[in-house]
Image (cartoon, rainbow, N blue to C red):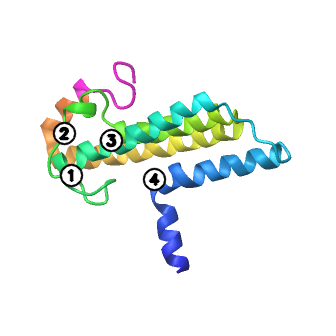
Amino acid sequence: MVEAVRKWARRTPVQTFVLCPLAVIGFQLVLLRGTLTVVPWRALVLLWGYLQYRLTGNFRLPRAGGSSGMTTPPDRLIESGPYGYTRNPMYLGHLIFVLGLAATFWSWFALVILAVRAVWFQKRVLRDEERLGRLFGGQYAAYRARVKRWIPGLL
């Protein structure tokens, strides 16, 4: 049972969409002695991040094969849809969600989590890109030259 919970908690979506919000809310409640600052309209950023993650995943899996995440790499390279704008729209959805946590709960602690998660995702992306380069060769190199890693047109 304990190992099953550990395995569940190591999953990236669980960390971002379950554990990070619980940590932020818990921290804010302790910091503010039982009061929680919530700016409801900013929860739209949370929704945006989550939907970007889910909808992009639903777009990717049937077209590319493999598994969610990179446990089993994709069989095909996708260069259309959200992947025509950014090479990592699912990971970007995670980061947008955590930004939404900071905005919704007016939390500097969530900003710290965002910085840590951004560094973690950057390292993960570099590993993923190396793996995809080996799998897809020149096709992936051309895709990388054409589509930005994170923010369309910028970064």
Q: Amino acid at mark 4?
A: Pro
Dominant SS of magenta comes to: loop
Answer whether residue 154 is magenta in the image. yes
Q: Amino acid at mark 3?
A: Leu
At x 39% / y 42%, what residue is drawn?
53
Question: Most extreme residue toward the top, as rendered?
Answer: 153
Location of mark 4 (residue): 13
Location of mark 1 (residue): 74
Residue segment shown in magenta: 145-155
Badge 2 crowding class, 10 Å Cα cut-off, few under 14, some 14 to 19, many 20 or more, is some
Instruction: Using residue 144 as the reference point, say whether residue 119 is left or right of it.
Output: right
The first of marks 3 and 2 along the sequence is: 3
Single out the mark in the foreground, 1 or 3.
3
Pointer 1 with pointer 2, Cβ within 8 A = yes
Location of mark 3 (residue): 55
Query: Along the line of sight, which residue is nearer the eye, 122 or 100?
Result: 100
